[in-house]
Amino acid sequence: MSNGTSRPPMHARRFVLATDLDGTFLGGSDADRRRLYDWIEDNRQTVGLIFVTGRDPKFIAELCDGGVPWPEYVIGDVGTTIAKVDDRQITPIAALERDISDTWNDAGDRVRAALDGHPGLALQPTEFRFRVSYDLDPEAFRPDAHDIVAELGHDSLVSDNKYFDVLPRGISKGPSLRKLVAHLEIEEDRVLAAGDTLNDLSMLVSGLPAVAVGGSEPELLSYVETVPTVYAAEAVGAAGILEAIAYRHQHPVPKGD
């Protein structure tokens, strides 16, 4: 799969979905996911697709080779990767990542040393370029990990009460998505940002039209309940995305069963 040379540029599409993966684009029933995925593939001339995820490019490539629609762009690694997709290749956009790299300043070893043995944190095996990530045991976790990260000059983020990410200061899904939308010259009201956990918060409250899908993390819902740009869907996962598109009249969508 490639982006397709016959497809209009992203700024010319009627609608662009910028979606988290786990629990959102990958959430809901098999039938709901198939309805969303088939609708995207049938409407590639008017629908653009951006993945905004904590997952890394290798995972995304394997996922799409397994039958999930390929996106045109990827914001991965909790906002620290910004990449274009061509012919099944996910290639970072150097101009958009420069400030991410500069802010991180090769901090991985320093972060891992500072948090080595910290209660409730188990280092994830993947070596990310501009982040360090841990699995979190909420029973054993000691909150002063946040203070340690802040003293190092970085940001920390807990999501779904089971992941702890260390990110370059000021970098997350929301700022990276807004940077990509501006770079691609997409009108903001044509975008829908979709998510379900706290690591989606920055993109849901970024000012772009957004949806917290059904089944979202309760703490996320408490943050966004008064944000006028965020729609709280009843339907879970993929069905919640289609519900929000219909609610906002951003593009005709198929009706559910």
Image (cartoon, rainbow, N blue to C red):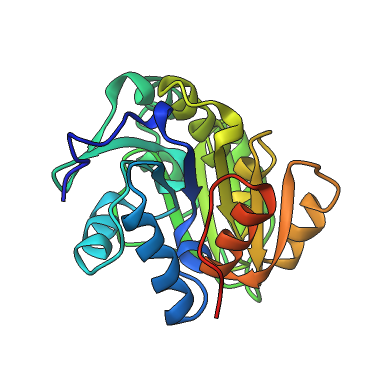
Q: Percent from the top left, x then y, of residue 141?
A: 63, 67
Judge whether residue 121 can be spotted in this image.
no
Q: Percent from the top left, x then y, of residue 214?
A: 66, 69
Q: Residue at x 31, y 36 (%)?
A: 83
Q: Percent from the top left, x then y, of residue 52?
A: 45, 47
Judge whether residue 155 can be spotted in this image.
yes
State how many labels appear: 0
Q: Residue at x 32, y 48 (%)?
A: 71
Q: Nearer the viewer, residue 230 or 77?
A: 230
Q: Percent from the top left, x then y, of residue 94?
A: 28, 23
Question: Seen in the image, is 141 located left or right of residue 180?
Answer: right
Question: Seen in the image, is 74 located left or right of residue 199?
Answer: left
With respect to residue 96, does 67 lie above or below? below
Q: Residue at x 75, y 67 (%)?
A: 218
- Quadrant of the rendered structure where residue 50 is? top left
With respect to residue 102, does 147 lie above or below? below
Instruction: Please state, as top left, top right, bottom left or bottom right, where the C terminus lies in the image.
Output: bottom right
Question: Seen in the image, is 2 located left or right of residue 29?
Answer: left
With respect to residue 74, does 168 lie above or below? above
With respect to residue 166, does 116 lie above or below? below
Q: Of all residues shown, which one is farthest toward the right?
A: 226
- Quadrant of the rendered structure where residue 90 is? top left
Question: Seen in the image, is 196 located left or right of residue 124?
Answer: right
Q: Nearer the viewer, residue 45 or 23?
A: 45
